[in-house]
C-alpha cells in the first residue's frame, strides 16, 4: 500500500513539474515575442514610438511621442473576427506574414496585416479626415493624380515600389497590364459590411488594376486561385521590398490590394526564421545604432 502511495506521489510530482515547466516555457515564448514585437514597432515607426512602460498590473504600453500610451495586449480572448474588429498590438502582429509567393488561397482565419490597430494609425497618419488630408502628398512618380500619406515615409515607399514595378513593366506585359490603370489610393471610407475605417482612409493603401477574380466577395476560391497563379511574383516582391503587404496572402483574399505596413514586413524579415535558442533580438539589424538603442530601452523595462 505504501509503495502504491509513493508511486502515486512520484507520478503527481512529475505531472506538476511538466505543467510548471510548460507554463514557464509558454511565458518565456510570450515575453520573447512581445519584446520582438515592440522592437519591430520602434523600427517601423521611429518618429512616433519613444518608449515602453510596464505598469504594476503587468500591462505593457507603447509610449508615443504625443504622450499617449497604447497597450500591447489587452489580455482578452478573441476569435478571428473579434481580432479584426478590435485588435490590440499583439493581435495585429500575431500572424506571421509569409514572404514567399503563394499560389493557393490561404485559410479563412489567416489574414496577416488585415488586423489594424487604429490608435496607432491615428497617432502616425492622422486622427480625422481633415488631419489625414493635411498629411497627403501628390505622388511624384507613376500615378501623379493620386495622393498618399507623407508620414512615416509612406509616399516615398510607394514611389520606390512603383519605380521598380514600372521598370519591370517595360519588358513584362503581364506586369504592365496590372499596373495600368490603378484603381486608387486615398479614399476616406469604411470597409464594406463593417464600421472600421479602410486603410485607404489613411492614405496608406493602393489598389492596382481591378480584375473580377481579385476579391473574396466577388470571386470563388477557384477563380481566386487562378488569379494568384498568374499574378507576377516580381511585382509582389517590389512592393514587399518597400514594406507593403499584399492582400493576395490573406484568406479573405484582396489580390489588387497593397498596404503600407512596415511593422508586418519587418517582423517577417527579421524574426521569421529565428532560432529559439538565440538572444531574443537575434535577426534584427544589430549593425544599426537605433536598433541597439531600442533593445536597451526594451531590456531595461521588460
Image (cartoon, rainbow, N blue to C red):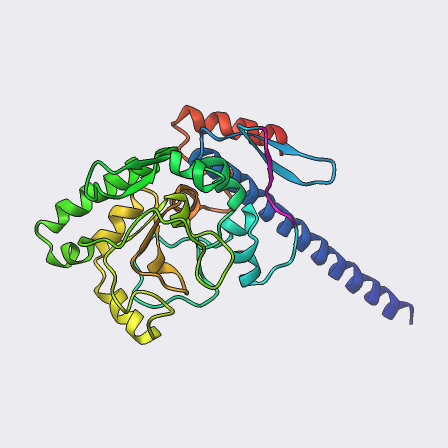
Residue 213 in which image quadrant? bottom left
34 left or right of 75? Answer: left
Count of labels shown?
A: 0
Q: Which quadrant does the C terminus fall into?
A: top right
Over which residues does the magenta segment extend?
A: 67-74
Seen at 31% across and 62% down, the residue is: 102
Residue at (24% x, 47% y) in the render: 238
Q: Position of residue 51 (x, y in %)?
A: 56, 29
Q: Nearer the viewer, residue 15 or 92?
A: 92
Is 33 placed above or below 112 here? above
Question: Quick check: 289 above or below 172?
Answer: above
Q: Quadrant of the rendered structure where residue 167 is?
A: top left
Q: Residue furthest right?
A: 1
| Residue 186 image offset from top left, x and y in percent | 34, 46
Residue 53 appears in the figure: yes
In the picture, the quarter occupied by the N terminus is: bottom right
Any magenta on residue 22? no
Amino acid at each position: 500500500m505504501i509503495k502504491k502511495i509513493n508511486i502515486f506521489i512520484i507520478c503527481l510530482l512529475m505531472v506538476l513539474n511538466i505543467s510548471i515547466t510548460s507554463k514557464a516555457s509558454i511565458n518565456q515564448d510570450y515575453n520573447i515575442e512581445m519584446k520582438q514585437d515592440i522592437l519591430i514597432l520602434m523600427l517601423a515607426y521611429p518618429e512616433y514610438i519613444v518608449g515602453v512602460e510596464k505598469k504594476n498590473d503587468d500591462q505593457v504600453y507603447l509610449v508615443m511621442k504625443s504622450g499617449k500610451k497604447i497597450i500591447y495586449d489587452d489580455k482578452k480572448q478573441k476569435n478571428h473576427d473579434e481580432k479584426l474588429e478590435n485588435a490590440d498590438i499583439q493581435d495585429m502582429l500575431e500572424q506571421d506574414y509569409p514572404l514567399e509567393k503563394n499560389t493557393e488561397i490561404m485559410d479563412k482565419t489567416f489574414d496577416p496585416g488585415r488586423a489594424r490597430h487604429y490608435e496607432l494609425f491615428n497617432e502616425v497618419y492622422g486622427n480625422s479626415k481633415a488631419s489625414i488630408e493635411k498629411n497627403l502628398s501628390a505622388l511624384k512618380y507613376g500615378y501623379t493624380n493620386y495622393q498618399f500619406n507623407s508620414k512615416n515615409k509612406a509616399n516615398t515607399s510607394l514611389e520606390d515600389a512603383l519605380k521598380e514595378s514600372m521598370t519591370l513593366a517595360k519588358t513584362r506585359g503581364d506586369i504592365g497590364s496590372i499596373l495600368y490603370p490603378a484603381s486608387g489610393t486615398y479614399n476616406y471610407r469604411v470597409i464594406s459590411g463593417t464600421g472600421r475605417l479602410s486603410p485607404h482612409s489613411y492614405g496608406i493603401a493602393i489598389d492596382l488594376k481591378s480584375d473580377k477574380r481579385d476579391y473574396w466577395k466577388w470571386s470563388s476560391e477557384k477563380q481566386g486561385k487562378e488569379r494568384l497563379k498568374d499574378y507576377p511574383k516580381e511585382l509582389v516582391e517590389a512592393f514587399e521590398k518597400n514594406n507593403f503587404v499584399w492582400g493576395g496572402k490573406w484568406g479573405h483574399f484582396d489580390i489588387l490590394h497593397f498596404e503600407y505596413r512596415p511593422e508586418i514586413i519587418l517582423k517577417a524579415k527579421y524574426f521569421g526564421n529565428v532560432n529559439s535558442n538565440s538572444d531574443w533580438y537575434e535577426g534584427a539589424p544589430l549593425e544599426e545604432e537605433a536598433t541597439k538603442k531600442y533593445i536597451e530601452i526594451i531590456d531595461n523595462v521588460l
